[in-house]
Amino acid sequence: MSVRAPLPKRHRLAMALVASLCMPAIAVAQTTPDSSAPSAAKDMDKVTVTGSRIKRTDVEAALPITIVHKTEIEAQGITSAEQLLQFLNIASNGSDNLASNAGIAPADLRGNNGVSGANLRGQGADATLVLLNGRRVATHGLRGQAVDLNSIPFAAIDRVEVLRDGASAVYGTDAIGGVINFITRNDYQGITVTAGFDVTQEGGGDVYTYSVLGGTGDIDTDGWNVWGTLNFRENEILRGTDRDFSNTFQPNRGLSPDTRGTPFATVANIAGGLINGTLVDPAGGVNQALVNTLNLPGGPGCEAGGDMMGPYAYQLWGVANSRYACAWDYPAAQVMQQPQESLQALGRATFKINDNHRFYAEAMGSRVESNRQFEAQQITSSATDSPTTLGPDTWYPLNDYTRDTYNMIYDALAGYFGTDNLVYENRIAYRWRCEVCGPRQIKTTTKAYRLLAGFEGNIGSWDYDIGLSRASSESESVLGSGYYFTPGFKAALGSGFLNPFLMPGQAQSAEGVAMLQAASAAGVRLYGGESTVTTLDASFSGGLGFNLWGGEVQAATGIDLRREEFEFGSVKEGITLDNSYIFGAPFDATNNMPKVQRDVKAVYAEVYLPVLDSLEVSVAVRRDDYDGFGATTNPKYSFKWQPIDALAFRGAYSTGFKVPEFTKLFSGVTESPYTGFDLADPGTCPGGVANPAVPGCEAIQPNILTGGKSDLRPEEAKQKSFGVVFAPTGNFNVSLDWWEIERINTIRVPNQQTLINNYDLFVDNWIRGTGGEVVAIDRRFINSGGTLISGIELDANLTGDLAGGQWRVNLNGSYIDNFQEKALESTPYGSNQVGEYIRYYSLPLRWKHTLGFGWAKGDWSHTLTQIYRSGYKDERPVSVANGSFIPEDWDPDVDDYITYNYSLAWTGLENARFTFVVRNLLNTDPPFTAHQNDFASGAAWEPRVADPRGRSFSLLVEYRFD
């Protein structure tokens, strides 16, 4: 076990403060008998469960719902909504967490700085409805597509209800994947302070959280109650270099970094440079495009350039003209966990008007600061000289200051290749990883709030709830280190004071560092946006006054009127938002969007029909009217049949309707270079797999066009589910639910493989130049056919008595049976992709489960949990895909990922609770994967599946003042 530094001082002080608050309780516990026996159970009140507006005492409803209580959340050491979603098996393995968002992403995900989303059943975070106490919150200000879970005041959560069945006719038919409802307490009296830490054994990625909850007033006796909570949470940075498994130099297994930009620079073969256009390899007759002198025969080797350098795997990438290049492990240089700080607050006041009516007001606010960090810039010389390229004026010059280094490079090249094509005194063109430039950082601050006021109560036998709310999420991203104003940056590079050919331990000159500092663009606003939603809603529910054979018919009805607004903007007008201003900054000027808005009017009704004592049927219908898209009516039907007490069957059918978000409609066109070497022109090379040995299958690197389209149509969906619940005894129950979601007119960035496989249908998306060559691929949002996904969800519980205590075993699992896509509505579905690697979005793992064993006795409770994620077929390296080279240890199967958590809770001190958790008990590394570095985060591991932190130790201390 490695030895790590103690907790930072400010966190030690905070934990000491909470510990001191517990001292009086410790003294009392030593002199008084145990007083922790549970109080008598109260009669179950009627409750409203997510998915229905009708209150009932039977919580085992027709719809499959997962309810996670605060005690269960704390037992797993979970302190944020993002962690909870990673724990739930129904949540998809998508690019929705701070780890999978840390690296390279396509343009349509570029604005996800610091965002954590909820993605249920593989439908995406934009198709999962997130509620706070049953009402909407604003989507994130940068993209306006999904709610940022980091804005949810997690310390105030009493329970989380997950409606696994989508397209809620009650809350909104845009909930195609499902609904997650974060529910806080209604009232509170007293003060509770909580402090916790979750520190890793190997260092990096520590998490600290502190909260205070206070309230006063009794509704029944005082007629009012006011409470509030404040929570602070800090995620510390976890770098790729902090973990040994994060290592891309494994070419024998099919993985190697696809870069020739190294801290000890690689020399480029460009006319006008030291290498003047031709440099034939004596060993193979191939003109070398990029050469690193460290890797020449007789040289010290690429590893001499630093711990993260190694030979460029030219065979793996099929690039023979880079045989003597070096590579640098840039995926391992990425950040595994983004540093983040969040401050969240929630307050609620309730006033009793009389026995039948109450007024309530609620305010939620949060401030989240994140720092998305990338590896240092790769500087690539260009043959042209313009404001937007690093032309010959930035190449390494020959002068009195640079002569020794210049001669070292010249002599090394001449010693192997000869001098015929070397022009002494010409500047040296190069590709260089500028570590002295510092890591590239984008710092994002998101301020979110929701204000809510309403009335609730009953009129006769009917309950009502009327509320008016306004919610906002305002985000701004500014540049941190690693970005420079172009004129000063180019001057520093071309001066010779910055030396791209330094060995480890050698420092850059003071003059070069000073020129970089003078050109720093840190603090420049990159872009910002705001998403707001204003809602007036009202719901009414109660009995209709007549009975069927199983009891009284119940009904609910309501309205939902809301205005959605969004605006987005880059830096101020008058500045050219490209490399001519700040080099390499990911400006998003094409997506500048003045405030746009739309009104949504909805009305819904729901009827609960107890047809027999053993059979209940629910029918709901919702009609939405969207500005610009017209009206749509969507029903939902569900039933539960319980022929005997121990057995119940349930099922549901519904339709969904989801209009495009503003960014998908109005975003401008963004051009991004395709950096891989695996793509060929499908017009001349069926299958589009690059293979230089086949005519017409040469590798191409066109620009990728992404952005919005104003003519997008709404998506539609159909959901089906059928389940069985079996509970033969009070100690055992099991439920099994089959579900299927078909989504048509799917709005998405068209998958590149789809454009290849259906080239005849998408020929216009392959944009060609005057010579017929592919110069760009149009991958803007489209309505593309659809997806079909189905699976089975399992939940089983068994309890019993042991050694004077009670034990419980729980198995919760999710099985994905089918995931298919089709390019157009008229085309058939493609092959089943379950268990296959998919870039960027949801990775459809066939089986996931959590298996928990708990035992509680008196003041102690123990929980041991196994978390299982099945393996899958890996992405094939370029050489494997085209059959040109098979690495000796290439294995297409990614291993299963299995970890164990152990928690211990103790409530032996009056008003205090201690929870200790060891996460990843066996310190299991993520399974190896050889996915292509340029299209995913993670070096040799998959952040959509695994937790890179390793074994960690968590302690949560809670103390309550009565």
Image (cartoon, rainbow, N blue to C red):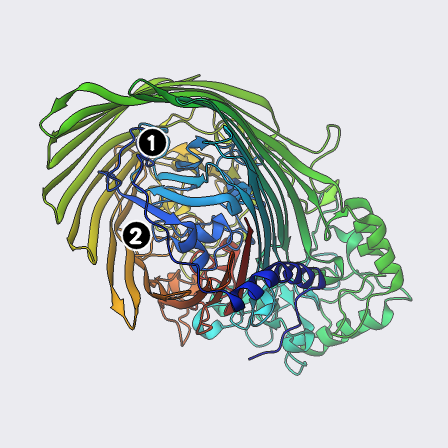
Task: Give the label on residue 400, or none.
Answer: none
Lateral position of residue 806 relative to residue 522, left or right: left
Counting from the top left corner in percent of width and height, residue 261 is at 65, 62
Q: Secondary structure at mark 2?
A: loop
Q: Can you see residue 697?
A: no
Question: At 34% across and 29% down in the image, what residue appears?
Answer: 173
Q: Amino acid at mark 1?
A: Asn
- Report the front residue among 529 and 807: 807
- According to the image, label 1 marks what residue? 745
- Report the front residue among 219 and 7: 219
Q: Quadrant of residue 667?
A: top right
Mark 2 and mark 1 in contact (Cβ < 8 Å)? no
Distance between mark 1 and mark 2 Cα atoms: 19 Å
Q: Quadrant of residue 905?
A: bottom left
Counting from the top left corner in percent of width and height, residue 200 is at 56, 68
Figure quadrant of the N terminus: bottom right
Q: Earlier in the sequence, mark 1 or mark 2?
A: 1
Counting from the top left corner in percent of width and height, residue 480 is at 72, 49
Image vertical order of residue 547 relative to residue 902, above or below: above
Q: Amino acid at mark 2?
A: Gln
Q: Can you see residue 104?
A: yes
Q: How many marks?
A: 2
- Report the front residue among 573 and 549: 549
Lateral position of residue 614 relative to residue 525, left or right: left
Label 1: how many Cα within 10 Å (few below 14, some 14–19, many 20+): many
Question: At 82% across and 66% down in the image, what residue appears?
Answer: 508
Lateral position of residue 300 relative to residue 790, left or right: right
Task: Give the label on residue 833, or none.
Answer: 2
Q: Quadrant of residue 240?
A: bottom right
